[in-house]
Structure formats: structure tokens, C-alpha cells
Amino acid sequence: MIPSSPAATAATGRVAGHPVDPLFLNRWSPRAFDGAPMPRAHLLTILEAARWAPSAFNIQPWRFVHAHRDDPAWDTFVGLLDPFNGGWAHRAAALVVVLSDTLVSGDGTRPDRPSSTHAFDAGAAWAQMALQATALGYQAHAMAGIERDAIRAALGVPERFHIPIAVALGRAADPVVLPETLRAREVPSDRLPLDAIAFAGAFPAAGA
Amino acid sequence: MIPSSPAATAATGRVAGHPVDPLFLNRWSPRAFDGAPMPRAHLLTILEAARWAPSAFNIQPWRFVHAHRDDPAWDTFVGLLDPFNGGWAHRAAALVVVLSDTLVSGDGTRPDRPSSTHAFDAGAAWAQMALQATALGYQAHAMAGIERDAIRAALGVPERFHIPIAVALGRAADPVVLPETLRAREVPSDRLPLDAIAFAGAFPAAGA
């Protein structure tokens, strides 16, 4: 059914060692976006995919605060990125600030307690968001370089929520829209070999 | 192109409020697996999908240690789950222990430094693993209930790696294979409404 040594080549030029769904190879993180808006229904579909992510005990610790480029809040959102990211992400169609709930809510008899899985679970939701964006012909670029204190103040984010990333969403464009220093970096990234990250039976011994 | 108020119904009985790729609705976390092995090529494809996940600065902090049910290490792996999870996951085709690197390696001039994103990034890799499993006709069930000290000792996991979850992979089976107490829980879970997790412009004010 599956060939013994397959390789899948995607539109991104990436080559997989095993025949994954092309969606995983086609998803990448461009900085050149075309500056066009996105239909509101598309952003809702992208967030809906995140909604269905798995989480420990189905707690769903993720929250999303978003703006479209034609919203009054757009300039505020762009200003909440660090200057480097703001320098390219202002051409995105939408920005989404991802939050994760550091507390598991109590139920009346039990108080709130710290969550040990909120970041991991929110990462799963982010991946589903990115893959659904790719499925719709967009790309999603996650940014850790964001102004968290300013986000908390401007968007009213409660203390209990961590702010792992913001996401720029849009249609990838010709890198010519980027400053020259960024053009050469505008290529889909490669990955460590599978045998450097996946091990049968045990973690390899140091020096092995 | 996209209908204004679409609903997608999946094989799982789930209804999406917006037309997501069916993969997101078809992925769920059963406990009833059929006890059959999985071709080794399929597990490699599932791990390959995780390999292509996005991560901050493409650091790829995820690692995977795996066993197939017909491997000598199988009983060891099942014994590393907590007793509740071991009670059903022994019918899986494969088990994967997911690790995340809490350090970002230095480069000779800089020492190793703590990673603030390893859990989030590993969560993205887990989601891609789960979705690829679903695409191949399997399901993946993440377990936080695992014996981390025993895993570290038995699998030789270095101190720098955190152990967020283990994953049971296999083909979903009739719930009749489960103890009666678990059969009623063997249904795909629902989610919070989208408008409870995604907000335009700002986080809703308390009491709003």
C-alpha cells in the first residue's frame, strides 16, 4: 500500500522521507504577504479548526483575539508586535493573538489550580489553525516576538492567561515586497532528519 | 465560495460551525483499539508529519521514543503509563513518548539557555502527528497520565527533556473491548462554542 522508501515533494520544494499529507509540507511561514483582506468567513474557519484541537481532559485552554486589516483595531494590533515583526506583518490579512489559560477552573467545591498542559495544548490549537489556513490557500506565521505587556493592556487580557504567540495570516506574496535583508530568508525551512528526532525503544545514549 | 452559515458533519457525529477540513472533525481520542499491529511505514509517516511542525526559530524541540506492539520493548512501554491508561492502551498498535527540549543549545560562543516555547512547539508537533494518524485511518490518544520518573529511567531520557505526554496509536475498535465503566465515555468530545474562545478586537470584559 505504502511504497517502501517514498518521497513526497511539495509546492514548497520540501521533500518528505515518508508520504505525509501534502498539507504538512505546504504549510510554511512566509513574511511576504499580499496586503489584501481576507473574507471574515475564512478567519472563522481557521479559528474553527483550532477549536477542534485535542487538549488534556478537553479543557481547551486556548483563546484567540483577532483583527482584520480593515478593522479599526488593525493599527493597534500591528503595534503590539515587536518592531521587526511589525515591519512585515502589517501586510497580513489578519492578526490573531493566541492565549493559553494557566489555570484550570474549579467547580465550586475545588479552587482554580495551575495547569501543567496549557502551553502544550495551545500549541496543538495553533498547528490546527496553521494547517486550516494552508488548506484555504493562506499561510500562517507565528511570532514569539510580541509586546506582551502592551498586549495585556490594550486587549484586556486577564492575568491568568499566558500570551505565547501572535499569528499573521494572509496570502503569500512575491518576496519583492520585503526589505532586501529579508528576501533571502523567504524560503520554506528544512527540518532535522527523522532519525535525529525519533528513536525506537529508547533515547540514544550520549555519544552514541 | 464559502456558504455564509455552513455546517460540516463528520463521521464522528461532530458538527462544525464553519467548513473546516474534515480531518479536524474526524480526529478524536478513542480508548478502544483493535489490538492489531501497524505497518512500520505508517508510524514513520505519522512521525514525519510531526517532524514538519512549525517551531520558534525552527528549533524543533520535539523528540519521540516509540514502540510497536510486537516489539520486545512493548510491555515496558505499557508499564510506563499510569494504571488507568495502561488498562486500555495495551490494545494500541504503537506507543510514542513525546519529549520536549527545555534548553536551546548554545553554539560554542553562547551557552545553552532555557527555552520558553518548547512545550508550545511540541504541542504543535503532537497535533500534526494526530492528524496524520487520522489521515491514515488510525486515531491517536494523548495521555498525560504517565510515569515520568520511570520513563526517564527506562528510556534513558536526559534531564534536559520534559515529558509532556505519551500517545497511543491504533485503529479504533468497538467499545465492547473496554471495561463497562469506560464504554459510555467512548464518544468524540464536543467543544466550547467558538464565540466563547475567539474574540474580535479585545478580550471580553469580566461579566460582559
Image: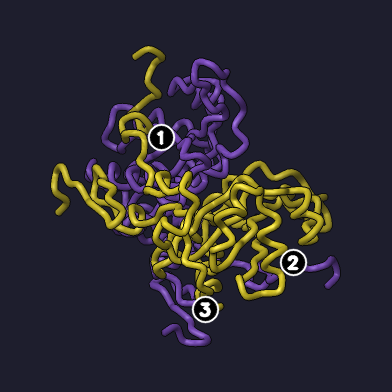
Chain colours: A purple, B yellow
User: Disc 1 to disc 3, how far (Cα)?
Assistant: 39 Å
**Residue B141 spot, x, y in % from top left:** 51, 54
Q: Residues at badges 1 and 3 in contact (C-beta under 8 Å)? A: no
Residue indicated by mark 3: B39
**Residue A47 spot, x, y in % from top left:** 34, 43
| Quarter of the picture holding the N terminus of chain A | bottom left
Q: Residues within 10 Å of mark 2 (few under 14, many from 20)?
A: many
**Same chain assignment for discs 3 and 2:** no
Q: Residue furthest bottom?
A: A4
Check disc 3 and report its element: helix, strand or loop. loop
Number of numbered discs on residues: 3
Q: Residue at x 44, y 67 (%)?
A: A25
Up-down: is B1 above or below A189?
above
Q: Residue at x 49, y 48 (%)?
A: A124
Give the chain letter at badge 3: B
Q: Residue at x 26, y 46 (%)?
A: B16
Q: Residue at x 68, y 50 (%)?
A: B163
Callout 2 amino acid: Ala
Q: Residues within 10 Å of mark 1 (few under 14, many from 20)?
A: many
**Disc number for residue A202:** 2
User: Disc 1 to disc 2, how far (Cα)?
Assistant: 38 Å
Q: Residues at badges 3 and 2 in contact (C-beta under 8 Å)? A: no
Callout 3 amino acid: Pro
